[in-house]
Image (cartoon, grey):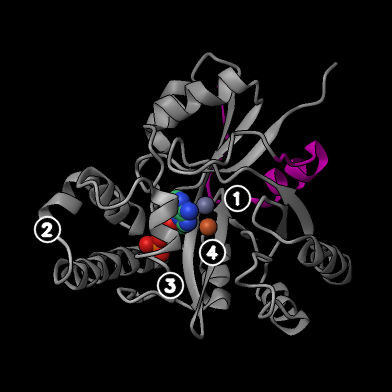
Amino acid sequence: MPERRIDLHAHSAVSDGTETPAELVAAALATGLDTVALTDHDTTAGWREAFDAAAGTGLTVVPGMELSTSQGEGSVHVLGYLFDPADAALLAETERIRTSRVTRAERIVARIAADYDISWEEVLAQAGEGETIGRPHIADALVARGVIPDRTTAFHTMLHRNGPYYERYYAPTPAEGVGLIRRAGGVAVLAHPATAARVSTLDRDSIRELAEAGLFGLEVEHRDNTEQGKTLLREYAREFGLVITGSSDYHGTGKPNRLGEHTTAPEVLETILAAGTGSAPFRG
Ligand code: AMP
Ligand code: FE
Ligand code: FE
Ligand code: ZN
């Protein structure tokens, strides 16, 4: 019996991935995954389509979301799984975040428009109705205009958080985010906690505080975590009793990350499934 392949972090075009939820499900099957979590930024709008696409295929879809939070100047992403998508507090907060993302993107585009020929309408055209807007959509509009060759170049230059056009958006603190997911019956896992930008702010006390707020796990196996950071994360996981996950953070063609490039152990998935009470995994 071959080992089960479990990838708990993937995006669709409902946020900043490039494939529809149904296309993502097809890609997961083509890659030979047994389980994939749909974790669009600040929205659950893709769940239904992913479930429908997985029906009868044998693929398990874990419903999830990547919740935006912020700590000081930094952005922290919290993966939530198996929460109640109708939870009023969580819905209100994701609505607030997404609204702030729109006005923030408008401000970024207004700044860029002072230097380049680009309009808000062109950016909106890159993000479909109801999608969670982000810098990737601004990047796509700039690519369409021929200003830059691809998203990655945009993030390394014009759209960099220390770049000239950057603007922030509203997000709750990581502890608030973990609490919201928990109170909605969900399981919270800190996404890519040890990226190069984050490793200096990754301290034992913040992880302890999040563990006390109900954090369940740390996404250790992720291409953006540094080796040094992963070693620290494994120590924190042992110390605070957190599980360790591995995932791709697939965004279709929007990022080089390939589905299944990192995976989560079956026994860890079982503990996540046992802990999540707000919604059920879809077993296709
Ligand atoms: P924002 O949510 O607007 O702050 O933009 C950050 C999002 O952009 C992250 O969630 C990433 O998925 C995406 N992103 C970051 N770096 C890159 C990159 N180099 N190429 C494509 N997408 C990226
Ligand atoms: Fe993203
Ligand atoms: Fe993220
Ligand atoms: Zn992600």
Can you tell me whether the CB of the residue at mark 3 lies under 8 Å from the nearest atom of ligand 1? Answer: yes
Q: Viewer-nearest of labels 2 and 1?
A: 2
- Report which residue position mark 2 lands on: 119
Toward which corner of the image does residue 273 lie, by quadrant? top right
Query: Which amino acid lies under the numbered mark 1 shown in the image of this protein?
Result: Thr
* Label whose residue precedes the other's in the sequence (2 or 1): 2
Label 1's element? loop
Labels 3 and 4 touching (C-beta < 8 A): no
- Report which residue position mark 3 lands on: 161
Query: Magenta part of the protein: which range?
Result: 262-284
Distance from Cα at disc 2 to Cα at disc 1: 44 Å
Within 10 Å of disc 3 (Cα), the crowding (few <14, some 14-19, many 20+) is some
Distance from Cα at disc 3 to Cα at disc 4: 15 Å
Q: Viewer-nearest of labels 3 and 1?
A: 3
* Label whose residue precedes the other's in the sequence (4 or 2): 4
Query: Which amino acid lies under the numbered mark 3 shown in the image of this protein?
Result: Arg
- Report which residue position mark 1 lands on: 277
Q: Quadrant of the C terminus?
A: top right
Q: Residue at x 88, y 65 (%)?
A: 238
Q: Residue at x 56, y 26 (%)?
A: 28
**Residue 13 left/right relative to 29:** left
Can you tell me whether the CB of the residue at mark 4 lies under 8 Å from the nearest atom of ligand 3? Answer: yes
Can you tell me whether the CB of the residue at mark 2 lies under 8 Å from the nearest atom of ligand 1? Answer: no
Labels 2 and 1 touching (C-beta < 8 A): no
Q: Residue at x 79, y 56 (%)?
A: 243
